[in-house]
Amino acid sequence: MNRTAIINVVGLSESLLGAHTPRINAFRDRGVLSRIVPAFPAVTCTAQSNYLTGQPPARHGIVANGWYNRELAEVQFWKQSNHLVGGKKIWDILREADPAFTCAKMFWWYNMYSSADWSVTPRPIYPADGRKFFDVYAWPYSIREELKGALGEFPFPAFWGPAAGLDSSRFAADAVSRWIAGAAQWIERKCAPTLNLIYLPHLDYNLQRFGPGHPVIDSDLRRIDEITGDLIDFFARQSVQVVLISEYGISAVDTPVHLNRLFRDQGWLTIKEELGLELLDCGASRVFAVADHQVAHIYINDPALEKKVRALLEQQPGVDDVWGDVEKKAHGLDHPRSGDLIAVARERAWFTYYYWQDDRRAPDFARTVDIHRKPGYDPVELFLDPSIPLVKARIVRRLLQKKLGFRMLMDVVPLDARLVKGSHGRRPADAREWPVLISGRSAAITGAALDSTEVCGVLGGLVAGSLRGGLR
C-alpha cells in the first residue's frame, strides 16, 4: 500500500486559491484538482462521515453536527464516540485488504473509540467541583503525555471561541493548526502510519466571522498555505503521498433566521423558567428547530401540525426549501435522527438556535462558549460582545476568579447574530465555493466533480494503489 497523508484544510475552496496560496497552487499544478459536490448538509460531521464511509447520512446516521435524541428528549451536539457513525470506515476496509495497514486520526471528528490505531482529539477535563481544564484525549493513552511533552499543551482556547483565528497575547492566530500539524509530524516519525488523517481548521474561523471577502482572509490564506506547504514538503521527504481535501466552502451571509422564535410566536414551543431565565424544553414542545448553519432539522412532536409547519416555513423570506419524507429520501437524509422536516436557508441566510424574545431572559450559557448545552450551532461564539465596556478586562477578571478557585461565568459572547458574515451547509450556487480534493497524482482523479460519497473510494484507491478505489 502507498503511505498517504490526507490533509483536511477546512473551508478551502477553489475561490480562495490565488496569489496568497502559492504552495497549494504549486501542489495543484503538479497534480489535479477536483471539486466535490458538497455533502448535505455541508457541515463537518456529515462531510467527514461521507468521506470516510462512502455512504450518505441515511446509511451512516450523521445527519448534522448534532440532532435531537428522541429517546432522551435532548439535543446533542459535537458528540465524539465513533460508534455513532454507522458502516465500515476507510481504515477498516483497508485493514481487511492488508492486515499490516495502520491509521492515525489527528483531530478528525468522531475520534473516540474508533478502530483507528492512533487518535488525538480535543477533550476538556471536568472535575466534580465544576472546574474545566483544557486538554486532549488520545489513544493509546500514552501518546497524550508524549505529544504534550514534545509540543506543549494544546492551545485549546484558540480552537474555538472569540480567540480562535486571531492573534493575541497568548496565542498566534494559527496556533491550533500549527499544533495539529506538529502532532501529525510527530505521529509520522514515531509510528509511520499507512494513513494519516490531519485536520487544519485555521481558515474556518475568520471565514465565518468576517466572510470570504474580508481583507483579513488574505493573511489567513498565507498562514494556512505555509502550514500546508510545510506538511507537503515534510511528507515528501518521508516518501508519503499527500492529498488535500476540504469539507465545505464558506459563503457570505447577512441574514440570520430565527426559526424557534417563529415557532414560539405560533405557541408551539414550551419554555421552562429556571432562576429567572428561559430554557427550551424540547420534549414538551410541539415543534422546534435544531439549527446547524444553513440547515435546520425541524422536529414535530405533534404530527397534526406538520402541514401547518411546512406551510409556515415555505412563507419565510430566509427559507429556500422545505423537505419532507420524499425529499429526505431523495437527498439521502431519510434516517431516524433527521427532523420530521428539514429547512434549507436561502443564499446569504443562515439559521440561529435563538428562542428567547427578550435578551434579558436568555439562558446563561447563551453568552458563553458552550457547544454542548446550546440546542443548535452558534457561530456568534466567535465574537466578544462589543456592548461590554473593557470586555478583555472582564475576561482577565474571570480568569483570575477561576485561578483562585471561585465559580465564574465567562459571559462575553454577544447575542447579535447579525455579526456573522460567513456560513455553510447548503450547496452554494457558485461551484467555485464547493469543497475540493487535490491529489499530487494526476492520474488519480479525472478533475470532474466528485460526489462526497465517492471520496472514500478515491482515497482508498490512492492508498491501495489503484486509481479509482472501489471501496464499498
Image: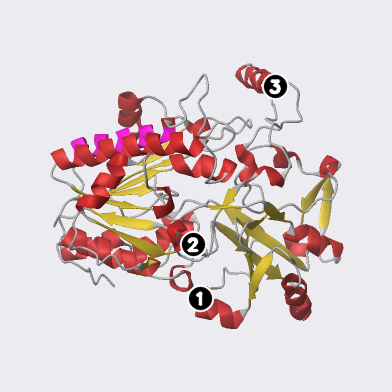
- Of residue 245 and residue 370, the one placed in the foreground of this image is 245
Residue type marked 1? His
Q: Is residue 11 above or below residue 176?
A: below
Q: Residue at x 78, y 63 (%)?
A: 284
Residue extending farthest to the bottom is 326
Closer to the camera: disc 3 or disc 2? 2
- Of residue 365 and residue 382, the one placed in the foreground of this image is 382
Q: Which residue is mark 1?
A: 331
Q: In terms of sequence position, does the residue under pointer 3 or pointer 2 come before the other?
A: 3
Going by the image, does 6 lie left or right of 66?
left
- Of residue 425 and residue 376, the one placed in the foreground of this image is 425
Q: Which residue is mark 3?
A: 394
Q: In terms of sequence position, does the residue under pointer 2 or pointer 1 come before the other?
A: 1
**Viewport quadrant of the N terminus:** bottom left
Q: Which mark is residue 261?
A: none
Scheme of image coloration: secondary structure
Q: In terms of sequence position, does the residue under pointer 3 or pointer 1 come before the other?
A: 1
**Viewport quadrant of the C terminus:** bottom left
Q: Residue at x 14, y 62 (%)?
A: 465
Going by the image, does 111 lie left or right of 381?
left
Residue type marked 2? Asp
Q: Which residue is mark 2?
A: 430
Image coordinates for residue 424, horizontal then vertical, percent: 54, 56
How would you rate the neighbour count of disc 1 (Cα within 10 Å): few for under 14, some for 14-19, many for 20 or more? some
* Region of the chain picked out in magenta, as a range: 176-191
Image coordinates for residue 275, horizontal then vertical, percent: 84, 40
Question: Secondary structure beneath disc 2?
Answer: loop
Residue type marked 3? Arg
